[in-house]
């Protein structure tokens, strides 16, 4: 599995349950937050509108508390330097393009130097018409440097320690 964290397993199991009901990548509308209420503080929902446009549709309260400015309604990539955008495009592009699951282990650091190690899981969701362009996921931050909740606004940078893809029945991207 991805991590030893039960929440990651729970989200994958729930996604697989939804897939078994519909026979394909579940639609965003099939995802019912009330089915997994314990996950909601750490959950996010992104819409991949274009390579460098990852619109934040929803973010849980635990993640919002870590942010140095509001997340919902913004382009997720606007929080990172432009030189990091291609790596995020490859990752999230694979999640919706393959489709597959993805997990990432990274250090996120704000311009003030505050940071946290973040373990995350991303899973694809589709529109009602079957276009895979949504990403539902979890982020579990592990505070490491200072208290990022008190960090002033500023773009973050990230250093990826590990990234893997999870076969959800459609294969995984070639290395």
Image: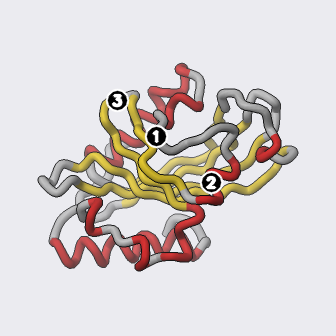
- Are discs 3 and 2 less than 8 Å apart at CB? no
Q: Which mark is residue 143?
A: none
Residue 58 pos. (x, y %): 46, 52
Q: Which residue is mark 2?
A: 63
- Mark pair 1, 2: CA separation: 14 Å
Q: Residue at x 78, y 33 (%)?
A: 152
Helix, strand or loop at label 3? It is loop
User: Where does the image place residue 159, in percent across and percent down from the top left?
Assistant: 65, 36
Percent coordinates x, y for residue 74 in the rendering: 48, 36
Q: What x and y, as percent, mark residue 101?
A: 38, 57
Q: Is residue 98 above or below residue 81?
A: below
- The foreground one among 4 and 146 is 146
Mark in front: 3 vs 2: 2
Q: Badge 3 is on which residue?
A: 51
Q: Does 133 sit left or right of 60 as displayed?
A: left
In this view, 96 is above or below 112: below
> Farthest left residue?
129
Determine the CA span between mark 3 and mark 2.
Answer: 23 Å
Q: Residues within 10 Å of mark 2 (few under 14, many from 20)?
A: some
Task: Give the quadrant of residue 139.
Answer: bottom right
> Looking at this view, is 13 or 62 the one in front?
62
Which residue in the structure is indicated by mark 1? Answer: 73
Q: Are marks 1 and 2 in contact (CB under 8 Å)?
A: no
Tell me which residue sits at (84%, 44%) in the image.
145
Q: Secondary structure at mark 2?
A: helix
């Amino acid at each position: 599995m991805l991590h030893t964290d039960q929440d990651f397993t729970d989200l994958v199991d729930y996604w697989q349950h939804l897939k078994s009901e519909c026979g394909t990548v579940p639609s965003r509308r099939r995802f019912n937050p009330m089915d997994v209420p314990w996950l909601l503080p750490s959950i996010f929902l992104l819409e991949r509108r274009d390579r460098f446009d990852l619109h934040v549709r929803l973010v849980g309260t635990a993640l919002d508390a870590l942010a140095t400015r509001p997340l919902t309604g913004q382009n997720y990539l606007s929080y990172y330097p432009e030189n990091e955008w291609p790596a995020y495009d490859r990752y999230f592009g694979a999640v919706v393009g393959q489709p597959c699951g993805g997990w990432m282990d990274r250090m996120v650091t704000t311009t003030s130097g505050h940071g946290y190690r973040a373990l995350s899981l991303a899973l694809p969701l589709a529109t009602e018409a079957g276009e895979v362009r949504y990403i539902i996921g979890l982020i579990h931050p592990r505070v490491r440097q200072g208290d990022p909740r008190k960090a002033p606004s500023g773009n973050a940078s990230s250093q990826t320690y590990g990234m893997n893809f999870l076969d959800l029945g459609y294969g995984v991207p070639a290395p």
